[in-house]
Amino acid sequence: MEWAYLVLTLVSVLNFATPLLLAATGELVVEKSGVLNLGVEGMMIVGAMTAYFVGAHIDLEICTVPHFSGVGCLVGTSSIPMERFAIVVLTGGLAGMALSFLFALLVLGFRSNQVATGLGLTLLGLTLTNALGSGSGDLKVGRVDTLLGTQASDWGIWGPLLNMNPMVWLTIILCLTVGWVLTHTRLGLIIRAVGENHDSAHTLGLPVQWVRLGAIVFGGLCAGMAGAYISMIQIGAPLWKEGITAGAGWLALALILFATWRAERVVLGALIFGFTLALELRLQTLAGLPSWFVPWLLPSLPYLIPIIVLTLISLDARVIRRNAPASLGKLFEPIS
């Protein structure tokens, strides 16, 4: 029974950590290239809304009969086949990319302030989704397939863990792969060179603007897919409501600072942040908590713990200076 409880806890932690990790992985590449994009929250919520609406309106071939041909339907309920779900997630990613292109146009093309532009991007995303997403509660979307389906019970207590959506494991692999690329490949060296000193990189003939454009677009893709995960998977069935990301984009940004721009620490930080979110959900079910704790302190718990951790990290300014890209957030003026 104890092992089963631990497995279910891990499933909950991974479920909450996945969108944070995916969005933070994209933002890690963006910041390594020397660009600070505070519009992650806006890209995530636009991706969440787009994925939900696409899932509700296109022909997803929702099935009710269980089968297993690499993927299978859930018994007793309509279900979105995994291959069609991949299309839905990619549309969410494309929506995030669209906003990231706008950010890149303003920051790289018109050389606008990165902080102000990122904040504006978040406001734009929230405004668009509030306007376009109103009245969507009547849409019906089937649940997303799992790999094992009804066969999950054959794996005993490990069934819920093995039956998680493949996006969970692919996100972890993606983050570790990105970390390896940044530290062990020529492409990673170019990205880090641009982020450390864009003037020197330009003098050496590196295409600073194109490198940053690619990083920004990749970050938008990851943020959009992270939003799609929230609206399509996180609660167990597709859901859309205003503000569904609930600050996940800001947590992803905080995660980069927590990890001091290192991919392996991003994974660890995502698990810690995911644990705080899962803990909040668990505490809501407990009886006997003080009356002031549930409505006031409990909702802020997932954000309070990261704030405390970030405060402790910031006490040692040397850690930040040693790991942060030197050109992060700075305006690049090409030398003619």
Image (cartoon, rainbow, N blue to C red):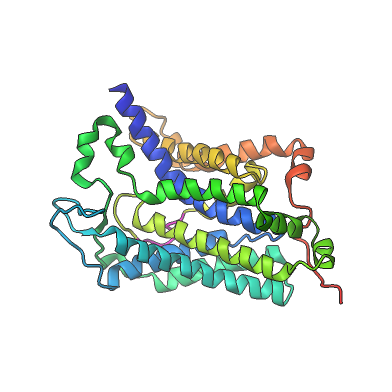
Q: Nearer the viewer, residue 197 or 124?
A: 197
Up the image or down, 332 lies above or below 159; here it is below
Up the image or down, 154 lies above or below 235; here it is above
Can residue 296 be seen at all in this image of the molecule?
yes
| Quarter of the figure with the N terminus | top left
Magenta stretch prevailing secondary structure: loop
Can residue 281 be seen at all in this image of the molecule?
no
Give the residue drawn at x 46%, y 65%. 93
| Quarter of the figure with the C terminus | bottom right
Up the image or down, 48 lies above or below 156; here it is below
Rendering coords of residue 179 (x, y %) = 60, 47
Rendering coords of residue 20 (x, y %) = 50, 49
Residue at the extreme top of the image, as rendered: 2
Total marks drawn? 0
Quarter of the image holding residue 159? top left
Q: Is residue 299 covered in magenta?
A: no
Give the residue drawn at x 86%, y 73%. 335
Rendering coords of residue 313 (x, y %) = 69, 37
Image position of 43 (left or right of 294): right
Q: Give the residues in magenta.
A: 240-245
